Amino acid sequence: MTEISDEVLLGELLSLPKKKITETLKNKDLVSTIKSIVDDLKAGGVDLSDESVSKETRTLVYDTATRFKDPKFIHHRGFFVDYIAQGKINPSHFPIYLNYFKKHSCDKEINKEQFEKDCGIGVVVSEDEVKAQVNKVLDSKKDAMDKSGWAFGYGPALGQIKKALPFADSALVVNTLEAELVSRLGPRPSAEEIKKANKKKGTKEKKVKEEKAPKETDYATLSDTVQFHKPEENIQKTPELLAEHLKITGGKVRTRFPPEPNGYLHIGHAKSMNLNFGYAKKNGGVCYLRFDDTNPAKEKTEYIDSIISSMKWLGHTPWKITYSSDYFQELYDLAIKLIKLGKAFVCHQTAEEMSRDRRLKVNSPWRDRPIEENLKLFNDMRLGKFEEGKAVLRMKADMQNDNPNLRDLVAYRIIYSPHPHVGDKWCIYPTYDYTHCIVDSLEHITHSLCTIEFENRKASYNWLVESLGLYLPPQIEFSRLNVSGYVMSKRKLTILVEKGIVRGWDDPRLPTIEGLRRRGYTPEGINTLCERVGITRASNLIAKSYLEECVRMDLDKKAPRAMAVLDPLKIRITNFDGETKYLDVPDFPADPNSKTHKVPLSSILYIEREDFNEVHSKDFYRLTPSQDVGLKYFGDGNISFRKAIKNSFGELVEIEAEIVPKQKVKSHIQWVSSPANESPSFVTVNLYDELFTVEDLSTVPDFLDAINPDSLRVIKALVDPSVL
């Protein structure tokens, strides 16, 4: 390709945002792949330097470079790029294309007709077709909608529609579904109302096991290499500030975990908690749980309660629980001080005007109004004399600075909403940028630990605290914990919950602490992951399998084993001796001293359907007409096939077998039985798969396009009595 800089390639030819350009430039192999694809497109008649080339085509270049990389089918990339050049590829259908190439990875050449048919090339699904399918699905769920309203099961409905119309535009499907639901059910209720409706679905009372008090985490595996400065080494503007600080803290470490109560905590917060609580405890200090509750429009008592619950469940104990709203009066008084210092002013620009002028480094028309006028107007804001959006208090820092966080950020805005912690005492509320650093100072935090995206805010953090002559807590950044296949954005998690795609904030498919808890993960397993990942500044994406490994290692010592059959195939043992035998099955098979539980075995038992094959092969180690198999924990013999019983459709419904003398077999399989003349114990099982069809959601234009419609299957399964 014509020699151009990598920055121009990514910025002008691909139209990538600045942040993604910076990340991509670190990966030379990726840049090389992008150049190769750009060259292939040019050979196909598409020159990205031509302004008429669509944004979708430019997006597809990056998507192809980052996602079409599996060694098993990368040899088909040229074929795929040809279709991009022809304008036949839809970016939102990328998961469909990848699945096709995975299935045909061994093919030397791709059959064009089959590819176009299976991937919907050239298929246009009209609005009428989408609307008809939406109505068809919703009509089939009329009873559920009449009973539960918006809590009828939005996610499964969306999945059914997408499955029926895999090539329809995702945005069109979602918008059509939303419009039809509003037409049938009225405006969508809040997430809290949906959650209450979901709880009303079940009328039977469930027996709830009494939970033990959470075990306090000892942070024994928190790396000793995590060492920051000592409190007495905090550099301050004057010796007096440091002396006063050390007098108040006694020279001890003080950290804080400061969530905003506008959602549930997720796995990323677990790392922050582990570091803040762990570092303080290992160094003889204390840690606050502080709610940064500065936006009453988005905060709820429900979120506050859930955060405290998640924190305790993970084994963390705060020194104190505080709220930024506890300091609203001090924050207001300091804002008055800032105005008197000539470092804050009341501004009447709209949000759009402010954003534009801050980007262009243009001063507000009201930046230089007199101090007395600012004091009067700020008081008028507090007295409710302005409408929302008609006046804000801005910090007067440095509009010409290259760091946008110093360009006169908003300190106070008007919000006429009651606050979940302090009620309706205030109608003006401080912003996060104004509040966070000041409350850190007021609480004399010795180590202000935060994730790396707050690094650019350090300049405004320091400017504000030093302008007010307060103690300056040192800010220390570390990388976020990201886990593949999970969405961590609170905004996106809220969309999943409010649209009903998942069953609430504690859905086991979500990375929320409550969701992981319902999935059966343990606090120790989650904390082990946080400590293993360590504290670095390097961006990292942890494979979900690594999290599962940490949890599995902990569960291996704690979770009693039981047998279950998810897809039962009935076995009738024709020579069973007696009515019922009771076997002693170990709770922990690997432990020779394990406790045991009783499991019944009678002439009727059930095995997994996949554990039987009518056609024998050398690679199949379980039951076949010519191959015996052992039953786990049954030492009196093996079972041997005798007869297959099928229904009128030719489907296998039962096997007749015999117990034969014990000999060496290739495998022992799970089974479930029940006492003679008793029905087997069926339970409802939720089978959870990945919520998304891709691991890295940053490679998808719209994360909703990657929703897996089959992420939850509800089945009836058989279990041994110890589970009940």
Image (spheres, rainbow, N blue to C red):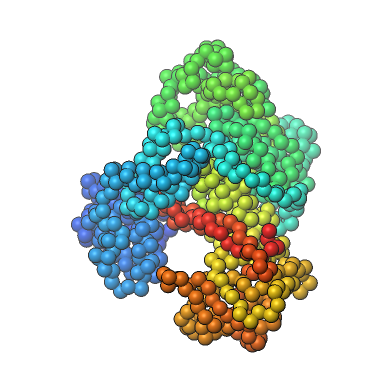
Closer to the camera, 305 or 108? 305
Image quadrant where residue 433 sits: top right
Instruction: Mark yes or no: residue 19 visible.
Output: no
Instruction: Name the residue at 79% across, 72% down.
Output: 593
Where residue 335 sits: x, y (%)? 60, 22
Task: Report the side of 12 relative to 645 (left or right).
Answer: left
- Which part of the image, by quadrant, shows the C terminus? bottom right
Instruction: Mark yes or no: residue 297 visible.
Output: yes
Q: Is residue 466 above or below residue 508?
A: above
Instruction: Name the residue at 68% across, 68% down.
Output: 675
Task: Report the side of 257 relative to 56 (left or right).
Answer: right
Task: Report the residue that reaches farthest toward the left.
Answer: 45
- Which part of the image, by quadrant, shows the N terminus? bottom left
Closer to the camera, 485 or 635? 635
Closer to the camera, 239 or 153? 153
Q: Is residue 706 above or below residue 238?
A: below
Where residue 413 sits: x, y (%)? 53, 23
Where residue 16 sits: x, y (%)? 36, 47
Where residue 417 sits: x, y (%)? 56, 23
Instruction: Name the residue at 54% across, 38% down.
Output: 194
Instruction: Name the residue at 69% across, 63% down.
Output: 721
Task: Report the side of 522 relative to 112 (left or right).
Answer: right
Closer to the camera, 422 or 689? 689
User: How many callouts does the rendering have?
Assistant: 0
